[in-house]
């Protein structure tokens, strides 16, 4: 039976699932799947600092903090890539553990403070759809729309840059700028989902729908659409299930549903497997 | 005591960490550290105690299972490495978290401890064997891990290093790179499991990856990288411990942040790759190059009628369009190197200067 709460939760989940699914496709194609994990973990100190600075837990405030922190993480990775011989994996590992560690330190600080406000931050670890307010969903909707419109507007440029950066450059496209836009959208996609899915598992929402969709099609538009659909439906289902009990964190439920879908997608088609990724060279 | 356990854990972690960073597999440590929770939870359900060896066994198996499944996905070519990794461990971890929240409640196993470990309580979990209190279990585990990892590296050093730097050669020589990979992953799994109880998922990753990455910025050879990694890991622990105790903050978090701070320090100061040394080197080269330009300029005007007006400080300033400070610096450098002499405004080449200028022009 559809009551108000479920509607709110469902809408929020739908938005985050669709957006992460869609952008996850590009992250997957650009081999940036694990960047999502690092960004999500890096967002934690952002949330804490936003809270400490403003003493508010409203979604807008926290999301801004998460966005800034996520961006700092991305820039750090890029900086490390340019300035040191360290490879991406170590850079991501650094961001992941150190930023998150900082977040944990800040959380321990917050928990010692005498106000009763801070308990909400803990839910950002594993997510809780039940805490979604209408204002939160509105925020998710606004950010999601921005990302969606951006995706449509820049679609062709993003596509070229993703599949053939050199060609894009030869065409005169500003590849760096487009990459920044795309990465920025990925950061937003992650940040949208943090309250529902949590920091620790958000990356799966970026990777799994796209990974599953990839198994079913080789073409971009079907892949992105399918990925968005898988993401949205898993998120809604997971959020609904999680709202049924009192102690069920949302993130894990959604991830398990997604993993199931991926598993199913991976099983058949053994004979086509060699062709799936090698494409034109066949 | 906590410090001792943490120090040993840090050493135990930095050892495989070096190889993970060199093999570009740092994120496997993150994946494994999350995945082992499932093994711990399942083991807990079977034994109903947190401190049985079955837990460690189960956890290690879970870690290896993650690696195996990830590898098979990669082999099947359905997904690339990063996607495969990012798929498998969240599934394991999600299942583990659900099991914990549903069935273990807050009684013995809770999500905070999972992420952060219980370093503060480690001294209280003691091993009692035949009625004899052997001391904190964490200490034994950490010591064992350190010994195990050191032994592993010592025994397998040739195969390990070869498969890290040149897997194809390693295979040709009969030292299967793949087996080495699984062996290393096994070590990482066990280390993660052992360290996990003490410091939690996040700090394990910090202790494995960050000290090794920091050492990478300094070291030119593998042994020094290993030594550096141990040094950085230990320092991070000590620093973090002090901070946490002083300000009453999360132990694991402080240690992770300290490791990060040390990394940033290395980033800025490292003689090879550090930002400040690089800036300094750049400046030095810049001055040298500018001086060469000056010498050539002076040479080309030597003996010409316009020499008196051209070869002066003021004219150089104008002609080269350098800033006042730069011109002064270049001139000072030139004098210091005995390339030129200066009387009032006039600059003259010395014999050495002339020679150098000619050599530059030939080049």
Image (spheres, rainbow, N blue to C red):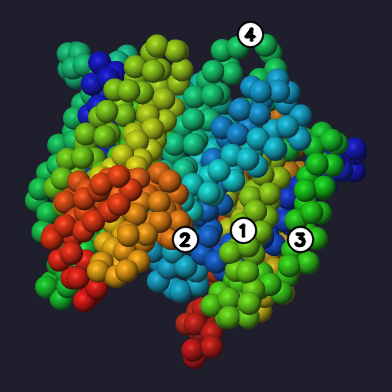
The local crowd at label 3, few if under 14, some if 14 to 19, many if 20 or more residues have their Cα within 10 Å, is some
In the image, are marks 2 and 3 on the same chain? no
Q: Which residue is mark 4?
A: A114
Of the residues tagged 4 and 1, which is closer to the observer?
A: 1
- Same chain shared by disc 4 and disc 1: yes
* Residue A112, horizontal then vertical, whole percent: 56, 12
CB atoms of marks 4 and 3 within 8 Å: no
- Label 1 environment density (alpha carbons within 10 Å; few <14, some 14–19, many ≥20): few
Crowding around mark 2 (Cα neighbors within 10 Å: few <14, some 14 to 19, many 20+) is: many
Mark nearer the N terminus (4 vs 1)? 4
Question: SS for tag 2?
Answer: helix
Q: Which residue is mark 2?
A: B82
Q: Are marks 4 and 1 in contact (CB under 8 Å)?
A: no
- Tell me what residue is drawn at x 26 percent, y 34 percent: B232
For residue A133, above or below residue A27: above
Q: Quadrant of residue B181?
A: bottom left
Q: If you read the primary sequence from the N terminus, does the residue marked by circle 1 or circle 3 appear first?
A: 3
The residue to which callout 1 is attached is: A180
Q: Residue furthest top?
A: A114
Q: Give the secondary structure at mark 1.
A: helix
How much space separates mark 4 and mark 3, taking CA atoms?
43 Å
Tag 4 secondary structure: loop
Q: Earlier in the sequence, mark 4 or mark 3?
A: 4
The residue that disc 3 covers is A150
Q: Compared with residue B17, is residue A114 higher up or lower down, i.e. above or below?
A: above
Whole-angstrom CA distance, mark 4 to mark 1, is: 41 Å
């Amino acid at each position: 039976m559809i009551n108000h709460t479920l509607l709110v939760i469902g809408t929020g989940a739908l938005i985050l699932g669709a957006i992460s699914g869609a952008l996850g496709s590009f992250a997957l194609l650009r081999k940036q799947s694990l960047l999502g994990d690092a960004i999500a973990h890096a967002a934690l100190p952002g949330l804490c600092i936003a809270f400490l600075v403003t003493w508010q837990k409203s979604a807008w405030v926290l999301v801004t903090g998460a966005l800034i922190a996520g961006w700092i993480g991305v820039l750090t990775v890029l900086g490390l890539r340019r300035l040191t011989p360290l490879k991406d994996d170590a850079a991501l590992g650094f961001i992941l553990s150190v930023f998150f560690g900082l977040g944990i330190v800040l959380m321990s600080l917050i928990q010692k403070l005498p106000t009763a406000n801070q308990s909400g931050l803990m839910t950002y670890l594993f997510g809780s759809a039940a805490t979604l307010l209408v204002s939160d969903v509105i925020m998710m909707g606004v950010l999601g729309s921005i990302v969606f419109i951006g995706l449509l507007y820049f679609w062709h440029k993003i596509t070229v840059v993703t599949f053939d950066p050199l060609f894009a450059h030869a065409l005169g496209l500003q590849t760096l700028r487009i990459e920044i836009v795309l990465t920025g959208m990925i950061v937003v996609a992650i940040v949208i989902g943090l309250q529902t899915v949590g920091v620790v598992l958000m990356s799966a929402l970026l990777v799994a729908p796209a990974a599953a969709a990839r198994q079913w099609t080789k073409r971009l538009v079907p892949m992105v659409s399918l990925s968005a659909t898988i993401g949205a439906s898993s998120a809604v289902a997971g959020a609904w299930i999680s709202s049924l009990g009192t102690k069920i964190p949302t993130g894990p439920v959604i991830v398990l549903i997604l993993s199931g879908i991926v598993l199913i997608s991976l099983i058949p088609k053994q004979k086509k497997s060699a062709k799936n990724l090698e494409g034109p060279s066949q | 005591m906590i410090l001792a356990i943490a120090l040993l854990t840090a050493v135990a972690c930095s050892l495989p960490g070096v190889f993970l960073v060199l093999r570009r597999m740092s994120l496997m440590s993150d994946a494994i550290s999350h995945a082992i929770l499932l093994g711990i939870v399942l083991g807990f359900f079977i034994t109903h105690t947190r401190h049985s060896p079955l837990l460690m066994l189960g956890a290690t198996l879970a870690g290896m299972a993650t690696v195996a499944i990830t590898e098979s996905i990669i082999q099947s070519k359905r997904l690339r490495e990063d996607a495969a990794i990012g798929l498998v461990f969240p599934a394991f971890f999600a299942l583990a978290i659900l099991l914990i929240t549903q069935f273990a409640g807050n009684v013995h196993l809770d999500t905070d401890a999972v992420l952060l470990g219980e370093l503060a309580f480690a001294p209280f979990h003691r091993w009692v064997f035949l009625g004899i209190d052997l001391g904190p279990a964490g200490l034994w585990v950490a010591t064992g891990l350190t010994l195990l990892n050191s032994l592993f590296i010592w025994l397998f050093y040739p195969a390990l290093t070869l498969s890290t730097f040149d897997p194809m050669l390693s295979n040709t020589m009969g030292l299967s790179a793949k087996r080495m990979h699984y062996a290393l992953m096994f070590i990482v799994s066990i280390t993660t499991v052992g360290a996990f109880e003490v410091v939690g998922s996040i700090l394990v990753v910090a202790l494995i990856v960050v000290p090794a990455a920091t050492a990478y910025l300094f070291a030119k050879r593998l042994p020094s990288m290993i030594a550096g990694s141990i040094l950085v890991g230990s320092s991070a622990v000590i620093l973090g411990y002090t901070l946490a105790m002083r300000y009453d903050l999360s132990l694991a978090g402080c240690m992770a942040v300290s490791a990060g701070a040390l990394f940033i320090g290395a980033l800025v100061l490292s003689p090879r790759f550090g930002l400040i040394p690089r800036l300094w080197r750049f400046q030095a080269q810049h001055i040298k190059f500018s001086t060469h330009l000056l010498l050539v300029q002076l040479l080309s005007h030597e003996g010409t009628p316009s020499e008196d007006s051209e070869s002066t400080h003021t004219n150089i300033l104008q002609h080269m369009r350098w800033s006042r400070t730069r011109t002064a610096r270049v001139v000072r450098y030139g004098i210091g190197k005995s390339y030129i002499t200066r009387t009032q405004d006039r600059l003259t080449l010395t014999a050495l200067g002339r020679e150098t200028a000619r050599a530059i022009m030939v080049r």
